[in-house]
Amino acid sequence: MTLEKMDDFILKHRDDYLNQLFNLLKIKSISTNEDEIRHCANVLKSEMETLGLDTQLIETGGNPVVYGELLNDKNRFTLLIYGHYDVQAVEPIELWDSNPFEPEIRDGRIYARGAGDNKGQLMAQLLGLKTYQALYGELPINVKFIFEGEEELGSVHLAEFVENHKALLEADLVYTSDGSSHNSGDPLILLGVRGVLILEMTAKGADFDNHSGNTGNIVPNPAWKLMRLLNTMRDDDGNVLVDGFYDKIRKPSDKEMELLKRLPYDQQDIAEKIGYEDLDMDGASYYHKLTMEPTFNIAGIESGYTGKNAKTIIPSTATVNMDIRLVADQDPEDVFKKIEEHVKEVDPSVTVTYKGAMRPSRTPAELEIVQAVTDAVAHAYGKEPLVQPSMPGSLPDYVWTEILNTPSIIMPYANFDQHNHSPNENLKVENFFAGIKCTCNLVRELGERNV
């Protein structure tokens, strides 16, 4: 009856809840739009205050953090909920079927910039709290919210903020609703993320481009120099040859390996969706490579002339951009230094430039709180969620697990095909309300367990 009460209440307040979300979606809070960011932060602060949260805007070196808390008993379980109120730019605007900042519902989906990433999921968290209060009164746990305004810029000030506010943010669990659910439609729990190291390598030849006939065999071509270097860094099977690259990688536990084997895998469906028909691996290998293994990816190479016309030159420079995904316990700075050392040994004339990084993170699957959240999600959705030890991409999850030393769980509420960062971003209406119910039930069950 408890879950039916939630369903009935949410259905009764459907229009009000949608209006609250739409009011937030109308704000053009693109990360670099300072005025709209401030406006959105203040609107969000007011929404949180109506729930009885003690709320404040806290300045950072960039956009402000909106922080709120409702603390009933310091001895109770404390849940810290993270989200972000900034959104991506909307260009190319001509590819949108409707105004990205005038939300509308079509075929059961809410279309607007930020619908899935992350205003819809953020609002589901707040409305889940509101639903609990309306149905049951005082919260059985302490709840804290931290909403940042720079996630789409790489959360550039979040780590510093967490470092400076450890006491304020102290919690037993960090809970995030961001990203997309599994392509099967089943609820998905993520226990971590891969990190990322972004770097650039540049090889130089002459001071300027040369005529390929007049100076051919005389002036060196930096593109060949770069290719020779890259061939010393990775073999044909994908193994990275940089000395020490695989050091410190945390091996998956038996529990994590078991979770990977449970994940659904349709090779043909995935091959079609990623546009690679030659995909040939079993499910266990697929998920292991996506979550437990680092990558060594060339994101782009630039050198010389690649236009439609003929241009016979020897380019003066060649540059490769790389994004290297890292797994639990790999240190981006350490990996960067090892790559620098490798380049110095092979070809010291090539310059290596650090462009940015985010540390990997993984919460142990064996923790009791992981099972508690899994059970609460299963009850809310009426089906067992998929539990994945890590997402393939990167989020600033390490600020919780390493700086705050707190377990962290990511539970995406948005549909798999939300088109976040793209034209026609959307959130299924059913996903929005399911997220509200999930948050409400999570608060209830964490209170009952007193974990």
Image: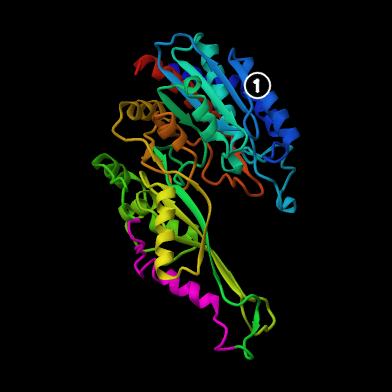
Q: Which residues are magenta?
A: 216-245
Q: Is residue 353 left or right of residue 270?
A: right
Q: Is residue 283 left or right of residue 142?
A: left
Residue 235 image position (x, y, % from top left): 36, 69
Does 53 appear above or below 304? Answer: above
Residue at the image position 31 percent from the left and 52 percent from the top: 247
- Please name the residue that numbered disc 1 is placed on: 45
Towards the viewer: 381 or 33: 33
Q: Is residue 258 magenta?
A: no
Residue 182 lies in quadrant: top left
Residue at the image position 49 percent from the left and 18 percent from the top: 143
Does 40 appear above or below 143? Answer: below
Q: Residues within 10 Å of mark 1 (few under 14, many from 20)?
A: many
Towards the viewer: 402 or 134: 402
Residue 414 image position (x, y, % from top left): 53, 38
| Quadrant containing the N terminus in the rendered view | top left
Residue 258 image position (x, y, % from top left): 27, 43
* Amino acid type, residue under disc 1 in the picture: Lys
Residue 112 seen in the current view: no
Q: Secondary structure at mark 1?
A: helix
Residue 362 lies in quadrant: top left
Residue 237 image position (x, y, % from top left): 34, 67
Residue at the image position 37 percent from the left and 64 percent from the top: 238
